Amino acid sequence: MPSAKTRVPAIDGWFTLDDSPALLGSRCTSCGTFAFPKETVFCRNPDCRSSEFAEAPLSRTGTVWSYTDACYTPPAPYVAADPYVPFCIAAVQLAAEQMVVMGQVVAGVGVDDLRVGTQVELVLDTLYEDDEHEYLVWKWQPVTGGEDSDA
Amino acid sequence: MPDDKRVAVLGAGMHPWGKWGRNFVEYGLAAASDALDEAGISWTDVQYVSGADTIRNGYPGFIAGATFAQALGWTGARVSSSYAACASGAQAVSNARAQILAGLCDVALVVGADTTPKGFFAPVGGERKDDPDWLRFHLLGATNPTYFALYARRRMDLYGATEADFAAVKVKNARHGLQNPYARYRKEVTAEEVLASPMVADPLRLLEICATSDGGAALVLTSLDFARRHAGTDDLVTIDAVSTVTPTFPQAVIDMPNFSTESAVAAPATGPTFKHAVALAAYEEAGIGPEDVDLAEVYDLSSALELDWYEDIGLCKQGEAERLLRDGDTTLGGRVPVNPSGGLSCFGEAIPAQAIAQVCELVWQLRGRATGRQVDGARVGITANQGLFGHGSSIIVSS
């Protein structure tokens, strides 16, 4: 029977909740520098004195910069499944934003399935659950039939 | 190099690393006492106390300089307490050195010590949704070894590093530390044992990731004039450079505890990477280059990370670290031994003490007193250390 739990983001305002989800970063209105999570106070570019930012959905696809499997249960505040199931984490290069963003990789994909340069796309998936809620987070998923690029 | 940039190291002291479970102040006092004895300096002659803070031992840890000063007996000495993540010890050295070079004092005592919990380092307690260090555990389950593993996996894909290479670093360091009385782990390990240990953060295994330890380290630093008068000789061990530079924008290598690198849209990432920049600044300050270095103590938080350091401190070009390792250049007896102390591999990390301990090892090496692990004819050594949140350090010591 399908879960009747309410699906809510594990953190507010970090990603969209539609069918083609995107991370929500910021873009400096003066120099164009992107940031994730959002910059709200002062631009990180030392040559820029702007404090104005626009919300910016980040590229939904990228290439793997590096990757690892988390074989041991991370400590709290990570909410781990019991029994623990190892998962993969990838750092992914976004071409347009010229930045690397980390994320868990979807279940069933591990280090043997990835290489530096593997094409991945952003999806939403369950991070953890309680009695009433399913908490969502962004994850990377290899693009089916995607061509690897040099990193 | 000119005298006005150097300070003398008159004494070094350490409390053995381990999991002793006692108050961190005890380890600091033992190390300070040994350093003062080695220097032939009385505590009451110390004019400046520079403490490296621990954040896991309550308020006394946050004001470590005063904690150690009070425990040794208040003397009216001036004091500072520094926290800079894993570079806390180097920052404490930097503070003391700056006071001496500015002529504000002649004799300074630097102390760092820690008592650590078991297992993965977890963030400080409480729900803090604006703290990236809390959020990376909560949203990603990204531990410190996660980041070390990302660097290691990239070496494998880009430079052909193998799990056997990473294991060989551990085997080397375990052998180096066998006779170091301050090392926590003094046991030879084989590559087979390393590769049979449980996988923690693929490709890094349990025996390749540094543990957390209790320990303490201390240094007595003085002006050159004071040291010459006190020791009656010009034959001194000196600190010639202390680099604590921050990264430059855009930081293009993913770093703890961040979710992302900085965007290079507005400014290209053309400069040296952060860890490389930390070492370059030290070389520049000392007026020497990597070719002048006889040995190095680097922060091997993981076995693979030691290979990154070979490149970052300029012992070889990018992508050549595996060859350096395989050729035996970085093993005791080789061209430039790395981590003759046994490194973090044999010590485990006692955060505020670790960067100080690296300097202690260089001092004893340069004095020819590193029994069982001596680098023959060592005259110049470099340390390299990586902290969190943009803290890192590199210190150059010469004789």
Image (cartoon, coloured by chain):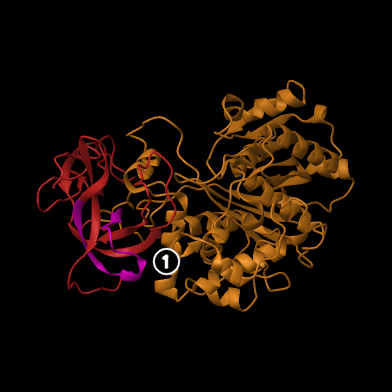
> Camera-side residue: B194 or B245?
B194
Q: Residues within 10 Å of mark 1 (few under 14, many from 20)?
A: many
**Residue A84 picture location, percent across and down:** 38, 51
> Camera-side residue: B318 or B257?
B257
Quarter of the view holding residue A141: bottom left
Q: Is residue B398 left or right of residue A51?
A: right
Q: Is residue B146 left or right of residue B166?
A: left
The answer to whether residue B314 shows anywhere in this view is no
**Residue B159 picture location, percent across and down:** 44, 75
Q: Identify residue for label 1.
A: B153
Q: Quadrant of the N terminus of chain B?
A: bottom right
> Camera-side residue: B327 or B41?
B327
The hue used for chain A is red
Q: Quadrant of the C terminus of chain B?
A: bottom right
**Residue A122 picture location, percent across and down:** 20, 56
Q: Is residue A135 left or right of residue B255?
A: left
- The residue sitting at the left extreme is A19
Queried whether the magenta region covers residue B129, the answer comes back as no
The residue that appears at 51% across and 75% down in the rendered structure is B320
The residue that appears at 62% across and 57% down in the rendered structure is B345
> Camera-side residue: B233 or B179?
B179
Vertical position of residue A51 compared to residue B287: above or below? above
The hue used for chain B is orange
The residue that appears at 50% across and 59% down in the rendered structure is B276
**Residue B59 picture location, percent across and down:** 57, 25
Under mark 1, the amino acid is Arg
Look at the image and give the residue range highlighted in magenta. Answer: A101-124
Vertical position of residue A109 compared to residue B136: above or below? below
